[in-house]
Image: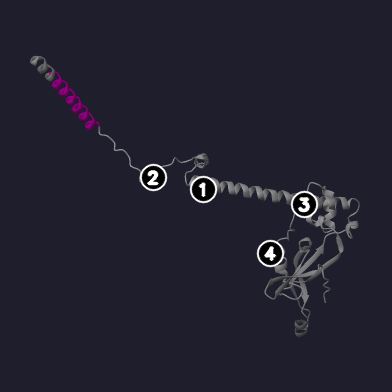
Amino acid sequence: MYDIPQFSDVQTRKIGKDKYEAYHGTDDDLIVSFEKYPVYLEHKSKLEGRKLYEERDHIRIQFPADRTREIFRPVKTEWDNAGPPDAERFPRQWAAWQNQASAVQAGTLLQEWPHVNKAQVLELKAMNIVTVEHLAAVTDSTLHTLGMGARELRDKAKTWLDRTREDATLSSVMARLEALEAENRALREGVNVPAEAEARQESFVPVRKPPASAKRAPRSDPAVAKQNRLAALARARAARSNKHSNLAQLQEGA
C-alpha cells in the first residue's frame, strides 16, 4: 500500500452548468518527475509459482525546502474526487517523461539568477529548490531549514519576480502600442493619404458655392465682340458724315 498524503488544498471551480472541477493552488511550486518502478504482480506470481514484476509509471512529488515530505505513487490515469489525471495536472513534466527527458522545472533556474553564487545554488538544490520561483515560495515555517540569510534571500527572490513581471507587463503594453501605430501607418499608406495631408484636410474650410438656380452671365466670344466694335465704329462714322452733309446744305441755302 502507498501512503498518499494530500500535498495541496483541493479547491473547486465551475466549468459549466452544474459542472465543477477540482484544482490545486500550489502545483506550480512542486518539483514533479515521473519514472518507472517495478510493481509486484501478486496474482500472476501465484499462477506461475514465482515472483513476477512489471515496471509501471510512477510519479514523485517533492516540496521546496522540505526534505521530510515526498509523494511517490503510481501515476493516476483517470479523474477522481481529488482531481484530474496526473498527465493533465502536470502536462509539461509528463511530456518530458514521455520523451525520455528530464522534467525541466518552470521558471528561472537558480544558476541563471545573478543574486546567488555556485555554492548557494548547490545548497539550495539539495533542499529541492532549483528555481527562483521555488525560492520565493518557501514558507516561513520551513525558512529555517535554509540556514542564515534565508529570509533575506527569499525576499530578494520575491522582489525580483515582482519587478520582472512588471517589466514584462510594460513591455507588452509598449509592444501593443507600437503594433497599433504600425496598423495606423499601414492604413494611411493603403489609401495614399499621408498624415500631413490629413491635417490639411481637417483645417481646410470649403468655399461656399452659389446656388444652382443662380444665373450666370454668358461668356462672350472674342470674334463676336470684335464684330460688334467694328459695327459701332461704322455707325459712328456714318453719323459724323451725315452731320457734315447737313451743315453744308444749310450754309449753301444761306
Residue 9 placement: quadrant: bottom right
66 vs 244, left or right, is right
Q: Is residue 128 magenta?
A: no
- Residue at (86% x, 62% y) in the render: 67
Local SS, label 3: helix
State the residue position of label 1.
187
Q: Residue 249 in the image: x percent, y percent?
A: 9, 18
Kind of residue sitting beneath label 2: Pro
State the residue position of label 3.
162
Q: Alpha carbon of mark 4 to alpha carbon of mark 3: how far? A: 29 Å
Furthest residue toward front: 254
Picture quarter with the N terminus: bottom right
- Residue at (8% x, 16% y) in the render: 253
Kind of residue sitting beneath label 1: Leu
Q: State the extent of the magenta-drawn residues as a range.
A: 222-244
Kind of residue sitting beneath label 3: Asp
Residue 253 vs residue 4, the one in the foreground: 253
Residue 29 vs residue 224, the one in the foreground: 224
Q: Which of marks 1 and 2 precedes in the sequence?
A: 1
State the residue position of label 2.
211
Kind of residue sitting beneath label 4: Ala
Furthest residue toward left: 253
Picture quarter with the C terminus: top left
State the residue position of label 4.
95
Residue 135 vs residue 164, the one in the foreground: 164
